[in-house]
Image (tube, helix red, strand yellow):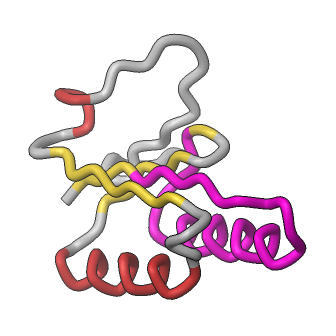
Amino acid sequence: MNIIVTYDVNTETKEGRRRLHKVAVICKNFGQRVQKSVFECSVSDAQMEKFRKSLTDIIDTQKDSLRIYRLVGPRENFVEVFGRDAFIDFEQPLVV
C-alpha cells in the first residue's frame, strides 16, 4: 500500500528534539523524504503495523502530531507535485 506520513514534533525541549530525530530515522527506514516532515512510503500490511507501532511508541500524543494517509491507488493518480520533486520510484528499474 502507498502511504504518506506527516509529522509535527514539538522541539522546544531536548526530549522533543530527540523524538523528532527518532521519528525521522524510522520514516527513512520505510520510505523516502519528499519534504522536511513528509515521507512517501510503499509498505505491506505487516510493515504498516510495525511502522505505525514504531512511530506511536515515540511520539508524545499531548505535544506532537502524526498523520498517515493511505493512497487508494498508484501515487501518480493521487499526488500532484509543483516545483522540485525528488521522488524515486523504487518499483521501477534503477540505472546506476
> Total marks drawn?
0
- Percent of width and height locating residue 17: 81, 68
Q: Position of residue 9 (x, y in %)?
A: 65, 60
Q: Is residue 30 magenta?
A: yes
Q: Is residue 37 left or right of residue 12?
A: left
Residue at image location 35% in from the left, 86% down from the top: 50
Q: Residue at x 31, y 59 (%)?
A: 42
- Residue 57 vertical position relative to residue 4 in the rendered view, above or below: below
Q: Which residues are magenta?
A: 5-34
Determine the image quadrant of residue 18: bottom right
Give the residue at the far left of this rendering. Answer: 72
14, 39: nearer the viewer: 14
Q: Does 29 appear above or below 5?
A: below
Tell me, yes or no, whether the highlighted magenta stretch contains residue 11: yes
Q: Position of residue 22 (x, y in %)?
A: 68, 76
The residue most toward the front is 62
Q: Residue at x 71, y 59 (%)?
A: 10
* Residue 39 position (above or below residue 1): above
Observer-nearest of 32 and 61: 61
Which x, y percent locates residue 1?
19, 60
Pick the residue in front: 13 or 68: 13
